[in-house]
Image: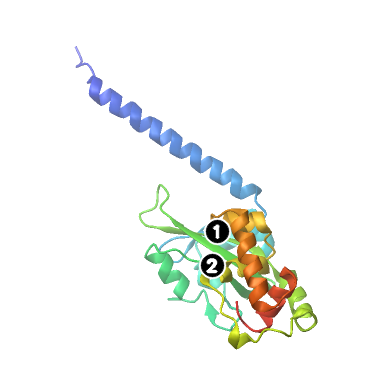
Amino acid sequence: MGAEASPVRTGLDMASSRRMSVSQDAESNLDRALARTGDGACAIAGDGRITLWNRAAEKIMGFTPREALGRSCCEVFVGRDDNGNPLRHKGCHGMELGRFGNPVQSFDMQTRTKGGRPVWLNISAVVTSPNGHSGPVTMHLFRDITATKELLNLLQERCAPPGARADDVKLTRRELEVLKLLAVGENTKAAAERLHVSPATVRNHVQSILNKLGAHNRLQAVAYATTHRLL
C-alpha cells in the first residue's frame, strides 16, 4: 500500500502552484498590454540582446520580431542625443546603468529605421527581473517624436523669449525633468503620473520654469530651452 502524501508537502505544492498561476497570469496581462500599446516596447537581457519586440516597435522601427529578436540592441538602436553624444553603443552609459540595476532616466535619441529614415525617439527604461531570466532585464518603452522635434525647430527662433539669458537660468533637477516631459508633449496629468507627484506640484514647477525663462507659455519655454540646449 503506497504512503500517503504529507499534508505539509501537499500544502507547499498547492501554494507553489498558486504562485506560478498568479505569475503566469501577470505575464499574460503584460503581454496583452504590450500588444495593445501604441508605444514601442523591447526587452534587453543582460548580454545586450533583444528578447521582446512588440507590434508598435515594428511599426516605428521597421524591424519585424524575427529580425529584431536575438540581435544586440546596439545593432538596432544606433544614434545620438540632442548634444551629438553617441547612444546605444557597447558600454554606453545607459547599458551600464541597466546592467547594475540602476534607474535609467528617459532620453531622446536620433536614429534611423530599417529603411534608413531618420527618426527621433523618446526612450524610457525600467530594470526588472522577470521569471525565466537569470539576471535583470531592461524594458524600454519608446515613441516617435520626430514631428515634435521638427515643430520645435520651426518655433525656436519665433517663440524664444528675449528676456532671459541662458547663462543666468538656473533650473532645478525637478524643473528640468518637468521641462523634458513638456518637450515630448506630456500634459500636466501625464507628467504628474510619470514623476509620481500631484498635478498641482507639476503646475507649480511649470510656473517657476516660465518665470525663470521669461516665457509666457509652455511652448515658449520648450522652444527657449531647446534653442539654448538646456535640455
* Residue 108 horizontal side relative to residue 8, left or right: right
* Residue 144 horizontal side relative to residue 31, left or right: right
Q: Residue furthest top?
A: 1
- The amino acid sitting under disc 2 is Arg
| Mark 2 / mark 1, whichever is N-terminal | 2
Give the percent coordinates (x, y) of residue 221: 69, 74
Residue 42, placed above or below residue 176: above
Please tell me in which quadrant of the rendered image residue 224 appears: bottom right
- In depth, the one of 145 and 196 nearer the eye is 196
Residue 36, placed above or below residue 125: above
Asked whether disc 2 touches disc 1, contact meaning CB atoms under 8 Å apart, the reply is yes
Give the percent coordinates (x, y) of residue 52: 53, 55
- Residue 112 visible somewhere in the drawing: no
Residue at 60% over, 81% down: 169
* Residue 139 horizontal side relative to residue 147, left or right: left
Residue at 28% over, 23% down: 10
Residue under label 2, please give it. 174
Please tell me in which quadrant of the rendered image residue 42 appears: bottom right
- In depth, the one of 79 and 58 nearer the eye is 79
SS for dot 2: helix
* Residue 8 horizontal side relative to residue 133, left or right: left
- In depth, the one of 190 and 103 nearer the eye is 190
Label 2: how many Cα within 10 Å (few below 14, some 14–19, many 20+):
few
Residue at 67% over, 61% down: 186
SS for dot 1: helix
Residue at 40% over, 63% down: 46
Residue under label 1, please give it. 195
